[in-house]
Image (tube, helix red, strand yellow):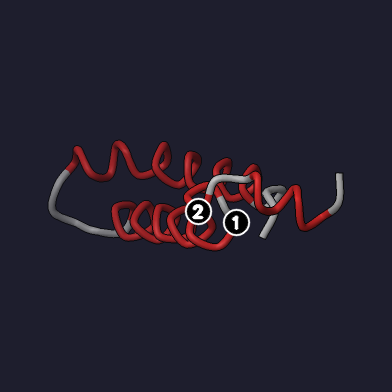
Amino acid sequence: MTASTKRASWPRLLRRGPLENIATALIGIGFLMLFQPFALALYTWSFVTMLVGTAMFIVVSKFPE
């Protein structure tokens, strides 16, 4: 299978670019949740949000462009 055939068979929504942006946004949201002083629930879930974003970024970085 050539690279162009492999790229064409990969679903467009599962490409690296959009999913890397979503993962980066999750990391940023988790960071903002960590440093806000108003809601304890947001602070509580901030680490989990950043962890999911980081794991997603690591996995998605292996996807084809």
Q: Position of residue 43 (x, y in %)?
A: 27, 44
Q: Is residue 43 left or right of residue 25?
A: left
Cβ–Cβ below 8 Å for labels 1 and 2? yes
Mark 2, other Cα within 10 Å: few <14 / some 14–19 / many ≥20: some
Secondary element at tag 2: helix
Q: Which mark is residue 1?
A: none
Q: Position of residue 20 (x, y in %)?
A: 54, 58
- Identify the residue at image location x=31%, y=60%: 32
Q: Residue furthest right?
A: 1
- Identify the residue at image location x=82%, y=55%: 3
* Residue type at the position of mark 1: Arg
Q: Tell me: residue 42, above or below residue 19.
A: above
Residue matched to label 1: 16
Nearer the observer, 62 or 7: 7
Real-space Cα distance between discs 1 and 2? 6 Å
- Identify the residue at image location x=75%, y=48%: 6
* Residue type at the position of mark 2: Leu
Nearer the observer, 31 or 37: 31
Residue matched to label 2: 19
Q: Is residue 52 left or right of residue 10?
A: left
Q: Is residue 5 left or right of residue 10?
A: right
Secondary element at tag 1: helix
Q: Position of residue 40 (x, y in %)?
A: 19, 41
Q: Tell me: residue 52, above or below residue 57.
A: above
